[in-house]
Amino acid sequence: MSGEPLPPNGRVVIVGASLAGARAAETLRSAGFGGRVTVVGDEPHAPYDRPPLSKQLLSGAWERERINLPSEQMSGVKLLLGATASQLNLATRTLSLLDGNELSYDGLVVATGARARTLDHLLRAPSDRVLTLRTVDDSRKLRARLHGHVVIVGAGFVGSEVASTALEAGARVTIIEPQAGPMRRVLGPSASAWLATVMQQAGVQLRLESSVVGLSMTPGDTGVEIALSDDTVVADTVVVGIGAAPNVEWLVGSGLKLDDGLVCDEALFAADHVVAAGDVARWYRTDLSRTVRLEHWTNAVKQAECAAQNLLLGRAAAAAFADQPYVWSDQFGIRIEVLGLPSEHHDDSIVWGSPDDNRFLISYRDGGELTAIVGVNATRPLLALRRRLAQHSGLDDELLSLVVR
Ligand code: FAD
């Protein structure tokens, strides 16, 4: 029968040994699941945290050990590191690994996250001057190159944070961004224009509405020539920060639905006995009547907890995943926090504080309906909002009025 609970002595395989994978394993154990739990991860490292990779670890403020994820609940969990999942057979409930081994499961958690998009197609050969940032090894490589002229392609979360850390390290920093402002798709025009001013005042050179059309090494490999649509820039190091692609290739041919992520129902099930969590999961939000995929730390944690609990309950008794998206970013001495799903197409207005003081809250509305709140150096009101949200039906004006008077 499909949709039944996981047998108490069953076998759970978790693919992806990072934030979502580790949290799913912990949740199974803390819920009292006594069966076998195996976590398969293709990186050689035990689970670690990624936010510091562009901040404290990249700047050298933190030692490597500090980013390890706590592992108290991981005892009794088998961790297979350096192991890549290559194929999934739903009918036989078997996971194949690249090394030829196979694992049988009663329940499967897909937590393979995402990887950095690259501009490799523009390069004749790989170069240690053209880098991306997703793993601890990427962060270590980049740390050694934060000098001279660092050019960052893409002013999203990761690109903007790297710009801040590189500047702090003494590098000359240029950002190339096709949009009219940094983080504009998320923040919208007003907050993006404010952030552009912050960056410029800090010393970043912003090349907006500009795209990279070619990358080549200068003679003697002494630098990288970046051809833009309207100019050429020479860098010592290029950091490509153009977003992430979900790791789903190993699921091709499994019968699971793939569409910029692994498509799941509202309870995070991709099929009977198969749940997903974190950056890889595209799940159905009943309140929005569409699927959403997020690349947020808090989302990975909360989804992993919900997915693991639902796997134990079985699909028939599973609860929908419901959580208001939240993401933070630390850059240029400022904390930016986003609650909800803002869009550059929504109407934005400042509801508290002032951009001149680098301390404010912006509300975002779609047809009058509140969709998101962005806080800049507004951690206390944001925290109050998040706490109240936990007892509230959703993001609405009543909630906002409780915090912003
Ligand atoms: P991942 O962390 O991507 O982990 C997936 C794991 O699965 C990886 O180890 C991967 O190698 C492995 N894997 C992939 N395919 C296979 C396979 N076939 N077999 C076995 N293993 C596989 N979020 C915030 O909210 N705030 C921040 O400030 C912030 N800063 C960030 C800074 C950086 C530099 C980065 C990269 C991310 C940041 N994030 C931030 C996002 C946050 O870290 C992610 O949302 C989170 O890591 C997602 O966790 P995950 O477990 O879903 O995926």
Image (cartoon, helix red, strand yellow):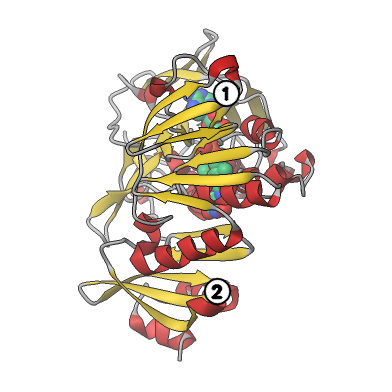
Height in image: 166 above or below 355? above
How many marks do you count on the picture? 2
- The residue at which mark 1 appears reads as 42
Q: Are marks 2 and 1 in contact (CB under 8 Å)?
A: no
**Residue 93: % across, % down:** 41, 22
Q: Amino acid type of disc 2? A: Asn
Q: Mark 1 belongs to which amino acid?
A: Asp
Q: Secondary structure at mark 1?
A: loop
**355 vs 301, nearest the viewer:** 355
Q: Is ligand 1 closer than 8 angstroms to the Cβ of mark 2? A: no
Which residue is at a point 69% across and 52% down the rendered structure image?
168
Q: Quadrant of the N terminus?
A: top left
Which label belongs to residue 358? 2
Q: Nearer the viewer, residue 53 or 232?
A: 232
- 55 left or right, relative to 375: right
In the displayed structure, would residue 239 be above or below residue 95? below
Ligand 1 near label 1 (Cβ, under 8 Å)? yes
